[in-house]
Each structure stands twice: as C-alpha cells, then as structure tokens.
Amino acid sequence: MSVPWNKIAKAAYPNVGFEARVKAGKRNIVLDEDGPCREEVIYSVRNRLQEEGYSRGRGQNWHDGSLKKKAGSALNLDAADLKQPGLTFLYACNDMDEGLSLICRRECCTEPTLALLDALVGPACVLLDHDRYVGDWWQTSLDEFLSKPKKLNRWHLAETTYKWYGTSNFFLRHPSLLSIVLGLFRQAFMLVNAGVEADLLKKIDRKEVEDCLTNADPALALRLITQTKPWLESSRGGTFFPFSDKNFRLLTDLHKAIFKHGYDEVFGGNLEDSWDLEAVRTGQVEGAFTYFGTKAKETTNRKRVAKLAKK
C-alpha cells in the first residue's frame, strides 16, 4: 500500500527521551535523558555514563587526555533489580514555550496512540531484546500514558508527558539500539499527527500484539513487523526515520545476530566498549545511520551484522 511519507515528514514531532536504570558497581544510577533529536540524547547518555564510571586526571578537563576507570564502578544493565516493572519507560513531550501540542489528550486520541506504540515499537523491542522478561509488565494504562508536566532538558516546562512502559533497558546496550528505539517511538507520534494511524491499526490484530509482548515471542514479532513494514520503512530518504526502504533488513538481521551470538559479538565489545567510554568527549556520536551506514554505503559494522545473521 502507499504510505504518504512526505505528509508524515511534515507532521509535528515530539521531543523524545527515556528513563532507565544502570548499575555502576553497587550503585543504581537513574538515567533520564531527552532531546529534540536522537543524537542529542545519545550524547547526553554517553557523557553521563562517563561521569559515573570514569575519572579525570588532576587538572584535566573532560576534553583532554585519557580517562581512568573508577574502582568498583563497572557498568551493568542486567541486574534483576534494574528490570522490575515500571523502572524503564520511553516518553514524549513538547516545549510549552513553543506553543506546540503533541496530540489531543482526549481518550479518542490517546487510546489509539497507545495502541499504535504497542504495535509499532513493541515488536521491535521483542526482536532486539534477547533477555526480555515474560509477563504483562509492559502494559501501559491511559493514566500512566498521560503524565504530569516535567522539566524538558531541565530548562523548559513541557506539556503533558506521554509515557510508554513496553520496553526494558536493553536499548542502552549500544547507541544504535537507542537510536532505533527512540526513532520508532517518535515515528508513532508522527503517524498520529499525520492522521494515518488508523490505517495501520486496521491491519494489526490487537490480540496478537498482546501475545507477542506478553510472551516475548520473536516469531510473532517478526510476523507483526512484516505487517507494519509499510509504516516502518520510509521511501522519503534521508536520516529522519529509523529505516528506509533500502535498509529495513537491518532490523531482522540485527534480531538474528543478537539472538544467535549475543550483544558482545554483534557490537564488538561490552557495554563500556559500545559507548567508547575510555575516549575523551567529543561532539561526535554514533546513531544507527552512522554506525551501520546505508544500503548503498554499508559500514563494516553492518557487514558484520549481516554475516552473523547468516551463521
């Protein structure tokens, strides 16, 4: 079917962010980062992880020299107390100073938006999280979805914050995973603001979405991803959307590679390697497009994923 990507690209889009926990040694660290673009969020996360796990030399600023790992501050995403229901969520909001309204807050609008997030973002999270817990912990009520205003980027007051609890903290395993998940999350709101969400929801069996997310069923997630593919792969080009019609296979290749070989082999190192935390800060961050490239110009990282997916 034809999806109006030029119309979608012009739709209002939100600031996106997340809240999740990571351990630095025995300490639980709460990460709460948001921004108008995914790269800004990734940059903030990297800086925060560096501050928690590494130290500078005397008289050295974060831009100079080498960083030293703090004793007893190894970073960990996998402890059981980091995975409890309600600890991780994605959120979207707009800056009230700009006078923008994200979506109508009546139930006639919020209910389909929440269903769209489950159908569009949920299966992708199942495919990329090989340790996803089984259970209905992912379900987000309308009251949870519509949250109180919060400080946006710690400067401006945001309007209603829209929270979605359908994922664990797995996306912190690598910047490209965070880029993909936040990109799909933002894309769902753009589909709503472009008025095309009803077409997608008509194609999807709600019961299958619930079974997929509750049972962490990758086979069902693959089927749902195939059904939603026209709304996931943009034919418009550019790097605004997570997937173009020429690199959508990256999602299924990533799933196969992660489930067969684990994150360390797929991303060439542990959590700290993935975020390049020993290097001094720069303005450079690697989202999914930078890390994997495009179909026309694939990076060695993309080629490694494709090779692992076939093994």
Image: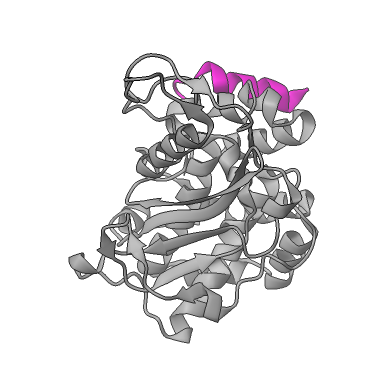
In front here: 294 or 213? 213
In front here: 298 or 52? 52
Q: Measuring 60% from the left and 33% from the top, which residue is drawn there? A: 73
Q: Position of residue 113 (x, y in %)?
A: 49, 71
Please say whether residue 80 is visible from this viewpoint: yes
Please report the bounds of the magenta region as a residue range. Answer: 293-311
**107 sits left or right of 121 in the view:** left
Q: Note whether 159 is above or below 33 in the view shown.
A: below
**186 sits left or right of 224 in the view:** left
**Is 309 inside the magenta-drawn segment?**
yes
**Is 170 inside the magenta-drawn segment?**
no
Q: How many marks?
A: 0
Q: Position of residue 192 (x, y in %)?
A: 42, 68
Q: Measuring 60% from the left and 63% from the top, which residue is drawn there? A: 119
Q: Tell me the quarter of the image containing the C terminus.
A: top right
Q: Measuring 41% from the left and 35% from the top, which residue is drawn there? A: 47
User: In the rendered image, which quarter is residue 60 located in?
Assistant: top left
How is the rendered protein coloured? Answer: one colour
Q: Residue furthest left?
A: 98
Q: Position of residue 63 (x, y in %)?
A: 32, 22
Q: Note whether 217 is above or below 104 in the view shown.
A: above
**238 sits left or right of 132 in the view:** left
In front here: 300 or 46? 46
Q: Residue furthest front?
A: 58
User: In the rendered image, which quarter is residue 4 located in?
Assistant: bottom left
Q: Measuring 34% from the left and 69% from the top, which residue is drawn there? A: 102
User: In the rendered image, which quarter is residue 88 located in?
Assistant: bottom right
